[in-house]
Amino acid sequence: MEGTAVRGRLTWQTATVTKITPETARASTIVFEVPDWAGHRAGQHLDVRLTADDGYRAERSYSIASAPGEPVAITVERLEDGEVSPYLTEELRPGDEIELRGPIGGYFVWDPATDHGPLLLAAGGSGVVPLRSILRDRERTGSAEKARLLYSSRSLPDVIYREELERPDPGLDVVYTLTRSRPPGWRGHAGRVDDALLAEVAWPTGQGPLAFVCGPTSFVEAVAEGLVGLGYPPARVKTERFGATGGRQ
Amino acid sequence: MSPISRGFHGRRRTPAGAEGRVPPGQYVTSDFPVLSAGPTPHTATEGWTFSITQGGDTKKSWTWDEMRALPEEDVTTDIHCVTRWSKLDTHWQAVSIDTLLEQVEHQAAYVLAFSDGGYTTNLPLQDVTGGQAWLAYGYEGGPLPAEHGGPARLLVPHLYFWKSAKWVRGLKLLEHDEPGFWETYGYNMYGDPWKEQRYAGD
């Protein structure tokens, strides 16, 4: 668990919303123009700050959805009892200004220059967001590492980036498991990720795989422990769990 | 000058009775979210030790039973995570870090807590002494669950909760401050929630 150099101060800056794209009924991707963005690595996050007209402020962290080198984007899923996500998904419009700072985090990060081994990406619900940054980075850098995305979603319409994932890049397999409802004739996996599904999807440990697991706590615990059970060294299983209320899978 | 977020009014305000207890930028949750960088280690209490080390030497070490034989304290406290949730009135069963450090002669100014799984975090000695820090093994009347840091974690509630190292196995005594795991990745060296010291330079 070695780190990189400590960075300087992270300052708030005003970004402009350039584009908002609905991904599902509840999730949207928001693209920003950030005047002074230091550049990010795949898997990092940023902080967003909203200010009400009475001065009240709310901040939240969101995973960056875009690859390094692409315009900064986040994908936000609306939480029914949320304070910030309903605003970002329903009120925000292109042209609006918003404060953000980042990038933040340096462990749940994939660096194509230094991280070797086939990628196993496991997403529970909107946990797919930082993994999409990794997948786009892999594509943009022409990485030769094979990749598998195991995506656990409530239903097919809840799958974020579905169009993009339906025409995957060469060397990428996408495996869905649908936990709540399945379309007629669904031949994919059903139910929560279990050890049998993991054993089927996970690269053999002999290939030196690197796993990134992101989702609600129960999903991350099950997948991370399952991978350790399959012989993955814990240092090769990087995890990120939703910080707010769970149960979003 | 922050731009006004047109149409944003905010919904979460501090619950009645909790005024003055919730640091800026935090919201109160009744959940206990889990955040960690890797798989949850499962360490049996047999074979578990807690060590105080300095310069590569173990100055003192306790087995699980030896640690549990030390005076137990019931701690009721609010906790604050850097990801912005705060949880009020949590109950812990713990041994004071004062009780452990009293058994060691030293002149350290800082400690680096170290854990199963390789996690570390740094703290000034004066923040883990004086009744402000504990080695916690009980939560809400039961054993501390592994996903929350069991069998034992550090509890330093006046700092952001990443300083309360899960799965803690000891303290390394230091003369000078050195960054731990998240601190190396840009998080604040001290982490005072009342000053919103989330990241380096805050």
Image: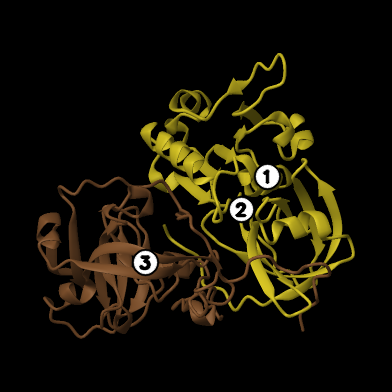
Chain colours: A yellow, B brown
Where does residue A144 sit, x and y in percent of width and height?
63, 38
Q: How far apart are marks 1 and 3 (CA)?
A: 31 Å
Relative to A127, residue A49 above or below: below
Confirm whether circles 2 and 3 share one chain: no
The amino acid pointed to by label 1 is Arg
The numbered disc on residue A132 is 1
Q: Nearer the viewer, residue B197 or B87?
A: B87
Query: In this rendering, which labeled residue sits more in front, label 1 or label 3?
Result: 3
The amino acid pointed to by label 3 is Ser
Q: From the image, tell me which residue sits under label 3.
A: B164
| Label 2 chain ID | A
Residue at coordinates 86% horizontally, 67% vertically from top-left? A96
Q: In which quarter of the image is the N terminus of chain B?
A: bottom right
Where does residue A46 sit, x and y in percent of width and height?
65, 63
Q: Distance between the residues labelled 2 and 3?
A: 25 Å
| Label 3 chain ID | B
| Label 1 chain ID | A
Residue at coordinates 27% horizontally, 55% vertically from top-left? B141
Confirm whether circles 2 and 1 share one chain: yes
Q: Are the residues flagged by discs 2 and 1 in contact, CB closer than 8 Å?
A: no
A10 displayed left or right of A89:
left
Residue A102 visible? The answer is no
Extreme residue toward the front, this view = B16
The amino acid pointed to by label 2 is Gly
A217 displayed left or right of A44:
left
Query: Callout 1 environment at 10 Å: few (<14), some (14 to 19), or many (20+)?
Result: many
Q: From the image, tell me which residue sits under label 2.
A: A43
Q: Are the residues flagged by discs 1 and 3 in contact, CB closer than 8 Å?
A: no
Q: Quadrant of residue A185?
A: top right
Q: Quadrant of the C terminus of chain B?
A: bottom right
* Mark 2 / mark 1, whichever is N-terminal: 2
Where does residue A51 sit, x and y in percent of width and height?
74, 74
